[in-house]
Amino acid sequence: MKFGVVVFPGSNCDQDMVYVLQSIMKQRVVQLWHKDSDLQGCDFIVLPGGFSFGDYLRSGAIARFSPIMEKVIEFANAGGNVLGICNGFQILCEAGLLPGALLHNNSQKFISKNTFIKSQTSNSRITAAINKNKALCIPIAHGEGRYFTDAETLKKLNNQDQILFRYCNEQGAINDAANPNGSLENIAGICNHQRNVFGMMPHPERAADKELRNVDGKLIFDSILSLVKSY
């Protein structure tokens, strides 16, 4: 499988993603510069974390207009798989590929720590192989990670099984105390209605190498590849 990792000015998790996909998952990877206009035949596009364009205006607001995003939007609208992590999630929301927005954390502080999330559905390419009863330890690092949307959209996300992950505690309980940033209903990740565009704030690429003593994030990459092999 061929993955494309988009690199924006200010991206700082692109090389982490390339390392995991290439060295750990043994997949073909190309880096796509934000000014490129060719996805190079990639099967799966990843928008990595970081601070694209210094997070000026709003996180992801400028990156959304990079030339590569026109091709990413076309790719997604044609059914191609796109995953945005942290800043990548913000860019997908700014581009209209995912509903809602990522607002400043309710603490008004940047948060960088391990947190726990729990899969809410098996009906997605990035969660299909994950036990919904297992709390995954995945780090977060963001200042604008509070997921917000209007009541009608929130209802649709729930009714249409589009919520991928919720923040929880180590025992798997989903409650206010386990919510690190004030996200609505502890939401940590969602997908679009067509189920081919995925966004999440936690960083699975930072929890996929046994040298880091945590491979919970690798389950997400295992899930992607397990489903792809069946097609």
Image (cartoon, helix red, strand yellow):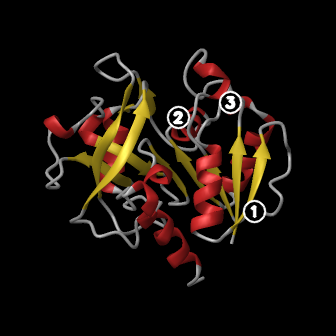
Rounded to the nearest angstrom, the CA distance separating label 3 from label 1 is 20 Å
Of the image marks 2 and 3, the number of the one nearer the N terminus: 3
Q: Which residue corresponds to mark 3?
A: 63
- Tally the marks: 3
Q: Are marks 3 and 1 in contact (CB under 8 Å)?
A: no
The correct choice, above or below, for 83 with respect to 48 in the image is: below
Rounded to the nearest angstrom, the CA distance separating label 2 from label 3 is 10 Å
Q: Position of residue 178 (x, y in %)?
A: 19, 40
| Residue at the spot 59% in from the left edge and 41% down from the top edge | 13
| Residue at the spot 18% in from the left edge and 51% down from the top edge | 170
The correct choice, above or below, for 53 with respect to 176 in the image is: above
Badge 3 element: helix
Is 210 situated left or right of 78 in this image? left
Outermost residue on the front side: it is 211
Q: Which residue corresponds to mark 2?
A: 90
| Residue at the spot 35% in from the left edge and 69% down from the top edge | 130
Q: Are marks 1 and 2 in contact (CB under 8 Å)?
A: no
The correct choice, above or below, for 225 with respect to 65 in the image is: below
Rounded to the nearest angstrom, the CA distance separating label 1 from label 2 is 22 Å
Q: For the residue marked with disc 3, what is the amino acid?
A: Ala
* Local crowd size for mark 1, using a 10 Å CA cut-off: few (<14), some (14–19), many (≥20): some
Quadrant (top left/top right/bottom left/bottom right) for the N terminus: bottom right
Q: For the residue marked with disc 1, what is the amino acid?
A: Cys
* Local crowd size for mark 2, using a 10 Å CA cut-off: few (<14), some (14–19), many (≥20): many
The correct choice, above or below, for 85 with respect to 113 in the image is: below
Q: For the residue marked with disc 2, what is the amino acid?
A: Gln
Q: Which residue corresponds to mark 1?
A: 42
Q: Position of residue 40 (x, y in %)?
A: 83, 58
In the image, 217 versus 72, the foreground residue is 217
Q: Position of residue 109 (x, y in %)?
A: 35, 18
Is 71 situated left or right of 19 in this image? right
